[in-house]
Image (spheres, coloured by chain):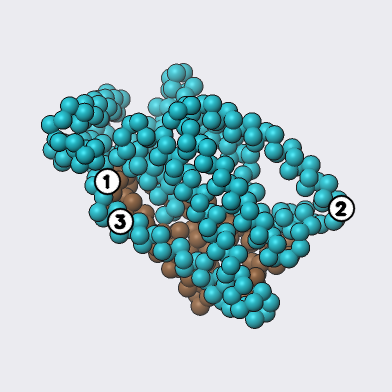
C-alpha cells in the first residue's frame, strides 16, 4: 500500500525490523482485547450488561478516532488506537 | 480493549436474553456474523486499495476509509443498545425482580402471569440464589454487591477453580479446548494471509488481497452448518467434525507452502 507506506513507512516494508513493527501493529489489537476481556466481567456485573456494552462501544469508537487521526499525530497514535480499539 | 470487552459482554447478553431453546444457535449466529464481518472487511479493503490507483498516486483514503468505516456498525450498536432491555438475569441478581418479570414477559411475548414466564423467572432466581450463597459461604467478606467486590471476586473465583479436583477437570477441558483451538494458528493464517499468499508465489498486492477475500468467503460458508445444526446435533459432534477438518487440512497447507517456498525461494516470515 503506497499511501500507507508514505505515512507509516517504518511499519510496512520488507526490512526485518519493519516486519517486527508490522507484527506489533497487528498483534497490539489482541493485547488490548486481552485487557478488555479482563475488565469485561467487572463491567457486565457492576454497570449491567446493557451499559457495559454501551461503555465498550464508546471505548471502541474512541480507539477508531485515534487511529483515524494517525496521519497528523504520528506512528504511536495508530498503535495506541489499535490497543484501545 | 473495546473489542475484547464487547466479545465477552455481547454473547453473555445474547445468551441471557434469548429463550433457552435457541441459545446455542444464537451464539453460533454471532460467530457467523463475525465471519461475515471479516469477509466484508476483506472485500472493503480490497476495493479501497484501488482509490487513486495502486501506485504512488494512491490516496490516503485507501487506508483511512477502511479504518473510519469501523465506526458505522459501532454507532449502530451504541444507539441500538439504548433501546434494548436490561438482561433479566442481571436484574434478578441485583434484586430488581419486578422489572425482571416485566422484561421476561416482553421478551417472550407472553403476559406477566403466564406459567412459562414464571417458570423461567424461578429458574433464573434459583441460579442467582445459588451463586450468591456460594459466594457468601466461600468468601463472606465479598458477599455485598459493590463494584469493588465484584472486581475482587473475579480473581478469587479463578482461584477456586483450582481447589477441587472436579472443578479442575472442568477447567482443563475448557482451557485445553480453547488453547488448541487458538493453537491451530488460525488467527496467524488470517492476519498474515496476504503475506502467506505472497510467499506462495502469488504476485502483486491485489492478488494477495483477492486470496484473502476468498478466505473470508470460505470461512463464512463453513460457519453456516454449525449455526444450523448446533442445537440439533449437540455441541460435541460439531466440535469433533471441526477438529477433524482442521487435522485434515493443516498437513495439506503445510506441505503446499513448504514445497512452494522452495520453488520460488521466497523469504520465510
Task: Count residues near mark 2 (Cα–Cα under 10 Å), then give few for <14, some for 14-19, many for 20+.
Answer: few
Image point 82% across, 50% down: which residue? B260
Task: Count residues near mark 1 (Cα–Cα under 10 Å), then give few for <14, some for 14-19, many for 20+.
Answer: many
Quarter of the image with the N terminus of chain B is bottom left
The residue tagged 3 is B80
From this view, report whether residue B124 is shown above or below residue B209: above
The residue tagged 1 is A48
The alpha-carbon separation of the residues under discs 3 and 1 comes to 16 Å
The answer to whether marks 2 and 3 mark residues whose Cβ atoms lie closer than 8 Å is no
On the same chain, marks 2 and 1? The answer is no
Considering depth in this image, is B55 or A59 the residue closer to the camera?
A: B55
The alpha-carbon separation of the residues under discs 2 and 3 comes to 53 Å
From this view, report whether residue B90 is shown above or below residue B176: below
| Chain in cyan on the image | B
Choose mark 3 or mark 1, whichever is in front. 3
The residue tagged 2 is B263
Amino acid at each position: 500500500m503506497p499511501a500507507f507506506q508514505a505515512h507509516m513507512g517504518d511499519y510496512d516494508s520488507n526490512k526485518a525490523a519493519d516486519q517486527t513493527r508490522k507484527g506489533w501493529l497487528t498483534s497490539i489489537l489482541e493485547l488490548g482485547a486481552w485487557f478488555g476481556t479482563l475488565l469485561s466481567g467487572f463491567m457486565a456485573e457492576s454497570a449491567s450488561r446493557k451499559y457495559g456494552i454501551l461503555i465498550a462501544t464508546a471505548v471502541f469508537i474512541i480507539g477508531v478516532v485515534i487511529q483515524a487521526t494517525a496521519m497528523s499525530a504520528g506512528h504511536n497514535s495508530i498503535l495506541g488506537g489499535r490497543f484501545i480499539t | 480493549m473495546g473489542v475484547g470487552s464487547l466479545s465477552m459482554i455481547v454473547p453473555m447478553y445474547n445468551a441471557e436474553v434469548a429463550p433457552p431453546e435457541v441459545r446455542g444457535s444464537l451464539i453460533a449466529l454471532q460467530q457467523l456474523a463475525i465471519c461475515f464481518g471479516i469477509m466484508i472487511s476483506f472485500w472493503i479493503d480490497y476495493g479501497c486499495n484501488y482509490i487513486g490507483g495502486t501506485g504512488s498516486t494512491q490516496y490516503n483514503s485507501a487506508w483511512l476509509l477502511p479504518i473510519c468505516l469501523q465506526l458505522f456498525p459501532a454507532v449502530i450498536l451504541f444507539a441500538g443498545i439504548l433501546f434494548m432491555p436490561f438482561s433479566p438475569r442481571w436484574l434478578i441478581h441485583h434484586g430488581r425482580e419486578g422489572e425482571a418479570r416485566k422484561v421476561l414477559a416482553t421478551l417472550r411475548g407472553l403476559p406477566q402471569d403466564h406459567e412459562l414466564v414464571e417458570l423461567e423467572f424461578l429458574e433464573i432466581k434459583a441460579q442467582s440464589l445459588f451463586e450468591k450463597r456460594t459466594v457468601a459461604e466461600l468468601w463472606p467478606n465479598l458477599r455485598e454487591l459493590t463494584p469493588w467486590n465484584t472486581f475482587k471476586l473475579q480473581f478469587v473465583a479463578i482461584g477456586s477453580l483450582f481447589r477441587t479436583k472436579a472443578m479442575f477437570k472442568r477447567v482443563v477441558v475448557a482451557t485445553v479446548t480453547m488453547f488448541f483451538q487458538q493453537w491451530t494458528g488460525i488467527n496467524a493464517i488470517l492476519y498474515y494471509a496476504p503475506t502467506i499468499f505472497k510467499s506462495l508465489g502469488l504476485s502483486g498486492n491485489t492478488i494477495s488481497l483477492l486470496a484473502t477475500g476468498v478466505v473470508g468467503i470460505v470461512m463464512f460458508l463453513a460457519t453456516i452448518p454449525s449455526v444450523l445444526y448446533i442445537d440439533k446435533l449437540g455441541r460435541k459432534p460439531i466440535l469433533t467434525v471441526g477438529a477433524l477438518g482442521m487435522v485434515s487440512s493443516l498437513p495439506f497447507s503445510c506441505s503446499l507452502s513448504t514445497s512452494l517456498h522452495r520453488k520460488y525461494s521466497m523469504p520465510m516470515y
